[in-house]
Amino acid sequence: MRSLLAIPLNGILLLFYNAMILASNNDTYLPDAVVATFEIPSSGGVLTITWNIVFVLAGICILFIEIVKSTRSTEQALLDHILSLGVFVVFLIELLIWREMGSATFLILTLLALVDVIAGFTVSLATARRDISIEG
């Protein structure tokens, strides 16, 4: 069970986004499909939620969880950072090579993966410094 904490959640998000793109065809682009529509009572405006927005919101929530996970100073945390770096590389390669991934949504998800990698290593280093005091 503890080894499941080493799985980067951004990788799961990447798998779901890839599945949605692969399920799209020339007639329908699924990430633009409407998930829900809400009327805002006070202004009368209409809030339309698409799959693109759902993925960005999920990415932000996942980034928070990944930063909290990076505060652990265990071997699983190191494995999580290495796997997160691998997930970011896959995001970047897909963004640069796969035409269907050339969207603003996928760019935002790629940047969230980059922030996850940088924040993870930064928080882990700060935590390690606090755990081990070096006197010189």
Image (cartoon, rainbow, N blue to C red):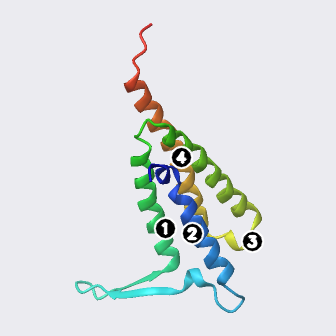
Whichever of labels 4 and 1 marks the residue nearer the N terminus, that label is 1
Secondary structure beneath label 3: helix
The foreground one among 62 and 47 is 62
Real-space Cα separation, disc 4 to disc 2, in angstroms: 24 Å
Residue 99, numbered circle: 3
Whichever of labels 4 and 3 marks the residue nearer the N terminus, that label is 4
For the residues bearing labels 4 and 3, Cβ distance under 8 angstroms = no
In the image: residue 19, left or right of residue 125: right
In percent of width and height, residue 88 lies at 62, 53
In percent of width and height, residue 122 lies at 48, 36
Query: Residue farthest to the right?
Result: 97
Q: Tell me the kind of residue under disc 3.
A: Arg
Query: Residue farthest to the top?
Result: 136
Quick check: 11 above or below 37?
above
Quick check: 49 above or below 128?
below
For the residues bearing labels 4 and 2, Cβ distance under 8 angstroms = no
- Let me know if residue 96 appears in the view: yes
Q: In this rendering, which labeled residue sits more in front, label 4 or label 2?
A: 4
In the image: residue 112, left or right of residue 42: right
- Let me know if residue 104 appears in the view: no
Whichever of labels 2 and 3 marks the residue nearer the N terminus, that label is 3
Quick check: 64 above or below 70?
below
Category of crowding for the residue at label 2, using alpha-carbon neighbours closer than 10 angstroms: few (below 14), some (14–19), many (at least 20): some
Give the residue pinned by disc 2. 105
Give the residue pinned by disc 1. 56
In percent of width and height, residue 110 lies at 59, 58
The foreground one among 67 and 80 is 80
Residue 116, numbered circle: none
Whichever of labels 4 and 2 marks the residue nearer the N terminus, that label is 4
Real-space Cα separation, disc 2 to disc 1, in angstroms: 7 Å
